[in-house]
């Protein structure tokens, strides 16, 4: 609600709106900050953004990422070995902000590294780094009020997580909290598992999210290939790809850029 | 001073399983419905006479409860020759599978069956909880997968064989430090994917609500029995109740029956490993800071940047960088006190109890024995009555102990040390 600067508050909204106008889903790309170190991470992140990411989901490394599969966990191990800290991640975010003025950046992470400092301090640091949104995996609605409201006061959106196991009443609560977008976890599992985009259950699930959400709806977990993206693009506002981008980034920045370009093309609807 | 003063603050879990500022349900959305279901269904089961009857029957006929209460006069005399205390040992070491862990596993697998779950997963550090879970699963005919850090698989190979013999699948976890915390991470990942048909049997009073409360209640049989046994034997309540704490389930189990008896001091003993000033300890109470970890808000060994640190103790069961939220609360309110003892002190205490009373304690429980000196210091010039939870037996630790206490035994039975020493020492 409280806004200091319209351009920072609305990068996410502006991006989803312009994707809608262009009749495409937004490509939301996840990469772990500092994987494998600050400089190479910066180079890879730039390559991904140049490839056509609509939204960057920047992962804060954590020693015990229980919701993530092996690919992202290993990325976090590499990042921590090269000395990643929250301050370092925010420095990296600031550099990206300088380079890509309109790119929405969502910080993805676990509660503990964020909440080591007082909430007022953390949200100020996030705002200064140009962060647009916050997604904290292990802060369900029961526990996120303080951080979510403090972030909102700084113009930082909250991304709400729904899972296929989430009953309707909970989903409604998650959606009421979400201001950036609702992140629908596509499958009952960790990041990087296999997803069948043709399953009728998935379609029903996505329909349910889209009917009730007051914000854009993105879908993620298990999305690797352009065909999956093509199948999902007509159904949702955004598509999140994580483990597969981390994997491409391990090969080279060029591979990552090419992968992002391929997936971004697949986000166009109406084939 | 006849009676040390104690603040009357029994902890009462409120909404979301909060123990003061500790506890909560910090899990990803995928797990939330399962955790909510447990929180809703567990109290119903616990009040259902049919459920309780079955649980208690199994504890009696299969686990071997009630466990004995043994007075340890020679140990008492060895600790303090003048004005020796009276020390009573609650013999959880005599349970089926050799420790208190089985009380919790029987209850949780029974609950899982009631909830219609068809598969059980668990984590294990020393292997005791894994063995107890595998045992309960064999008893109920449920498939069982146990996650165990690859380091622990190597250190506790006998328990790996026991679990496999009981029909469980043991999955070594190579990520992170390849110890207990990584086994928990792996079990949580399994559960995120399998939550619809799988119950996760957490082995201690930790994790998201309702686990800390549920595991405490499933272990409180220790305290309930011991309280009645003490009253019968001595005609009064003990002055102090002592137990070791890693995650803290045996301690919460025995404390639970005494928390409201404000005349009874509660003392927990944590593992300081090679010393709290080194990087190799598991002293969460002494060195932990408030954090969010494994689904709960509690004290955690962590860096200034919020990354978890590896814990160390010679006792694999205490080798955990967190602690149950109710313990953090009991310390915060002053209702319980916590002290630390080192690897060396625990080894000495194991020998002392073996040689004075003919009881070989688990290395975990040996920490409680070693902690008695801290307890006695609370009663200068008095002869307190002490109840100590002997949470497990030491058979599982013989391999560890041989290397530290009895190199001659290694020689005698022809075990070659990993270092390849050719036996020039120790003659």
Image: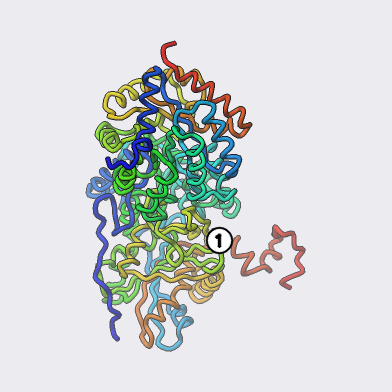
State the residue lying farthest toward the top. Answer: A271
**Can you give x and y, in whole percent of width and height, for residue B388 in the image?**
39, 70
Indicate left or right for B43 with A182 as reference.
left
Indicate left or right for B126 with B334 as reference.
right
Indicate left or right for A73 with A210 as reference.
right
- Residue at image point 24% right, 54% down: B14
Any part of residue B121 in sight: no
Q: How many marks?
A: 1
* Front-most of residues B92 and A102: A102
- Residue at image point 36% right, 86% down: B382
User: Which residue position holds label 1?
Assistant: B397
SS at circle 1: helix
* Front-most of residues A170 and A149: A149
Q: Quadrant of residue B63?
A: bottom left
Q: Is residue A189 above or below residue B351?
A: above
**Can you give x and y, in whole percent of width and height, for residue B347 in the image?**
55, 70
Indicate left or right for B108 with A192 as reference.
left
Instruction: Look at the image and tell me in which quarter the C terminus of chain B lies.
Output: bottom right
Q: Is residue A75 above or below residue B316?
A: above
Q: Chain of mark 1?
A: B
Instruction: Look at the image and tell me in which quarter the N terminus of chain B lies.
Output: bottom left
Any part of residue A220 in sight: yes
**Can you give x and y, in whole percent of width and height, for residue B294 in the image?**
42, 49
Q: How is the image coloured?
A: rainbow
**Can you give x and y, in whole percent of width and height, for residue B239 in the image?**
32, 76
* Front-most of residues B368 and B392: B368
């Amino acid at each position: 609600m409280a806004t200091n600067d319209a351009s920072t508050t609305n990068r996410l909204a502006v991006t989803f709106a312009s994707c809608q106008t262009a009749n495409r889903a937004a490509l939301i790309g996840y990469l772990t900050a500092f994987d494998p170190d600050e400089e190479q991470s910066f180079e890879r992140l730039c390559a991904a953004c140049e490839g056509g990411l609509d939204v960057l989901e920047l992962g804060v490394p954590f020693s015990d990422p229980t919701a993530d599969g092996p690919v992202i966990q290993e990325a976090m191990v590499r990042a921590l070995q090269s000395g990643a800290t929250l301050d370092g991640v925010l420095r990296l975010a600031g550099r990206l902000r300088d380079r890509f003025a309109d790119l929405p950046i969502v910080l993805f992470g676990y509660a503990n590294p964020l909440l080591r400092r007082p909430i007022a301090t953390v949200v100020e640091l996030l705002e200064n780094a140009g962060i647009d949104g916050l997604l904290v995996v292990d802060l369900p609605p029961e526990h996120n009020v303080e951080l979510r409201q403090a972030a909102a006061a700084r113009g930082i959106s909250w991304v709400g997580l729904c899972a296929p196991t989430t009953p309707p009443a909970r989903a409604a609560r998650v959606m009421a909290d979400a201001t950036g977008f609702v992140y629908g976890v596509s499958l009952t599992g960790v990041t990087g598992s296999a997803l069948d985009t043709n399953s009728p259950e998935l379609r029903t699930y996505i329909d349910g999210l889209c009917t009730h959400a007051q914000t854009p709806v993105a879908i993620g977990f298990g999305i690797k290939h352009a065909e999956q993206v093509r199948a999902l693009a007509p159904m949702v506002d955004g598509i999140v790809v994580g483990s597969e981008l981390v994997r491409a980034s391990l090969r080279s920045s060029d591979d990552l850029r090419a992968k992002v370009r391929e997936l971004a093309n697949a986000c166009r609807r109406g084939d | 001073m006849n009676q040390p003063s104690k603040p009357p603050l029994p902890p009462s879990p409120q909404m979301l399983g909060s123990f003061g500022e500790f506890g909560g349900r910090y899990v990803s959305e995928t797990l939330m419905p399962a955790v909510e279901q447990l929180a809703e269904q567990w109290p119903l089961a616990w009040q259902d006479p049919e459920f309780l009857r079955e649980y208690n029957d199994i504890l009696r006929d299969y686990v071997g409860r009630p466990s004995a209460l043994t007075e340890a006069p020679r140990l008492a005399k060895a600790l303090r020759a003048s004005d020796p205390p009276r020390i009573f040992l609650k013999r959880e070491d005599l349970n089926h599978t050799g420790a208190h862990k089985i009380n919790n596993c029987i209850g949780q697998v029974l609950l899982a069956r009631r909830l219609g779950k068809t598969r059980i997963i668990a984590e294990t550090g020393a292997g005791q909880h894994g063995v107890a879970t595998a045992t309960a699963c064999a008893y109920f005919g449920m498939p069982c997968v146990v996650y165990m850090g690859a380091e622990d698989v190597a250190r506790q190979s006998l328990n790996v064989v026991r679990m496999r013999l009981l029909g469980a699948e043991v999955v070594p976890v190579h990520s992170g430090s390849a110890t207990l915390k990584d086994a928990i991470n792996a079990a949580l990942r399994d559960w995120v994917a399998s939550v619809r048909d799988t119950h996760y049997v957490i082995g201690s009073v930790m994790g998201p609500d309702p686990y800390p409360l549920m595991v405490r209640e499933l272990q409180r049989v220790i305290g309930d029995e011991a309280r009645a046994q003490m009253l019968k034997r001595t005609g009064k309540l003990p002055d102090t109740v002592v137990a070791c704490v890693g995650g803290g389930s045996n301690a919460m189990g025995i404390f639970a029956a005494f928390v409201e008896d404000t005349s009874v001091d509660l003392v927990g003993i944590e593992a300081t490993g090679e010393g709290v000033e080194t990087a190799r300890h598991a002293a969460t109470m002494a060195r932990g800071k408030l954090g969010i970890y494994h689904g709960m808000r509690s004290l955690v060994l962590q860096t200034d940047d919020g990354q978890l640190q590896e814990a160390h103790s010679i006792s694999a069961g205490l080798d955990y960088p967190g602690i149950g939220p109710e313990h953090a609360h009991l310390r915060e309110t002053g209702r319980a006190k916590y002290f630390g003892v080192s690897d060396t002190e625990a080894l000495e205490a194991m020998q002392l109890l073996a040689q004075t009373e003919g009881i070989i304690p688990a290395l975990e429980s040996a920490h409680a024995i070693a902690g008695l000196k801290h307890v006695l210091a609370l009663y200068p010039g008095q002869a307190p009555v002490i109840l100590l939870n002997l949470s497990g037996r030491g058979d599982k630790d013989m391999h560890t102990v041989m290397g530290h206490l009895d190199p001659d035994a290694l020689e005698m039975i022809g075990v070659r040390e990993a270092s390849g020493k050719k036996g020039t020492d120790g003659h």
